[in-house]
Amino acid sequence: MIENDKDYKFSGKFEDTKLIHIHTKDKCYFTINALNKLIEVTSDIEDKKDYIKKEIDFNLYNNKLILLRSNNLIIEEIEKI
């Protein structure tokens, strides 16, 4: 059981045999590619090198799983069982 969500990472299978690496920040779970796509669609930053400068309010994505599937951003609500 995870008691706090700081610096936890885990990998899991998603859709057949693909393995993805999930990162977490303030109860938001995401892949790096999905995070980059989120920055792309929510900001006016044109150069990908500048993505690092974009601050994301992770509180907007509490209890969300952010993935990229076929270049489409997927944001799913997650809940504790």
Image (cartoon, rainbow, N blue to C red):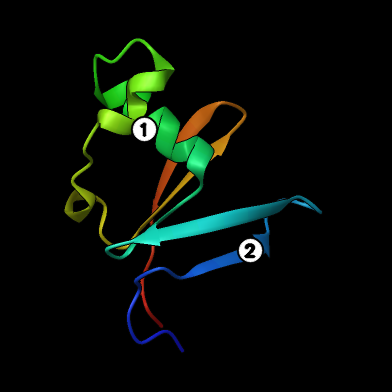
The image shows residue 15 at horizontal and vertical percentages of 71, 51
Q: Position of residue 26 (x, y in %)?
A: 27, 63
- Secondary structure beneath label 1: helix
Q: Is residue 43 above or below residue 1?
A: above
In the picture provided, is 67 more to the left or to the right than 64? right
Query: Circle 1 sits on which residue?
Result: 38
Q: Residues within 10 Å of mark 1 (few under 14, many from 20)?
A: some
Which residue sits at x=79%, y=52%?
Answer: 16
Near-viewer residue (77 or 30)? 30
Please, what is the three-letter code of the amino acid marked with disc 1?
Answer: Leu
Mark 2 and mark 1: span between their CA atoms? 20 Å
* The quarter of the displayed image where residue 13 is located: bottom right
Q: Quadrant of the C terminus?
A: bottom left
Image quadrant of residue 35? top left
Residue 29: percent from the left, percent from the top? 41, 58
Q: Name the amino acid, label 2.
A: Ser
**Tag 1 or tag 2, which sits nearer the N-term?**
2
Which residue sits at x=18%, y=46%? 57
Above-or-below relation of 68 to 57: above
* Picture disc at residue 11: 2
Q: Residue at x 63, y 63 (%)?
A: 11
CA neighbours of label 2 inside 10 A, class few (<14), some (14 to 19), many (20+): few
Task: Say if 4 sits above or below 16 in the image.
Answer: below
**Foreground residue among 59 and 72:** 59
Q: Residue at x 25, y 31 (%)?
A: 54
